[in-house]
Image (cartoon, grey):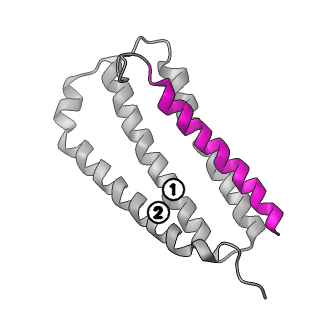
Amino acid sequence: MAAHPLEAWRDFFVMIGSSAGALVGLLFVVMSLHLGSIVERSDANMRATIDGSRNNTFHLLTVLVEAALLLAPQPILWLAVELVVVNLYGLRLPVGMVLKYARRGLTISERGGFPFAPIVTIFAAYVLGAAGSVMLTQSV
């Protein structure tokens, strides 16, 4: 039987998954430490910032889940399907941010407006992840 085509990347996936798990823990601690400041302000900027932080946690959890899926011994076709599902499910986060906050006059980006650039980057990452997962089926 031939070696798993992703075996050469094993250490990379372990490192990325471990880093994502540690960062999820750190985000949880930071949000817990600043809970008082968060509760005091209830304007749209703060709500968008909180939603963005929550989404960052989900993005990191997505990386952790993908690393776990890549490290689990399973057929490549199953892996590809799982990764497509995870990436398409992750697309709901940037799309939801745009639908919820795009027309609210936020001032949370570095230039004082809606942070389209990071959201487009995250959207593109999920689309590329889904496309790359489909391409993975070509190695079968």
How many marks the image carries: the answer is: 2
Residue occupied by mark 1: 63
Residue 75 magenta: no
Residue occupied by mark 2: 16
Which mark is drawn over residue 25?
A: none
* Quadrant of res 78: bottom right
Frontmost of labels 2 and 1 is: 2
* Quadrant of res 137: bottom right
Residue 31, x across and y down, in percent: 26, 43
Give the extent of the magenta segment.
Answer: 114-140
Q: Amino acid at mark 2?
A: Ile
Mark 1, Cα crowd under 10 Å, few <14 / some 14-19 / many 20+, is: many
| Front-most of residues 51 and 121 | 121
> What's the magenta bit mostly, secondary-structure-wise?
helix
Residue 1, x across and y down, in percent: 79, 88
Residue 91 visible to an observer of this rendering: no
Residue 110, x across and y down, in percent: 35, 23
Q: Amino acid at mark 1?
A: Val
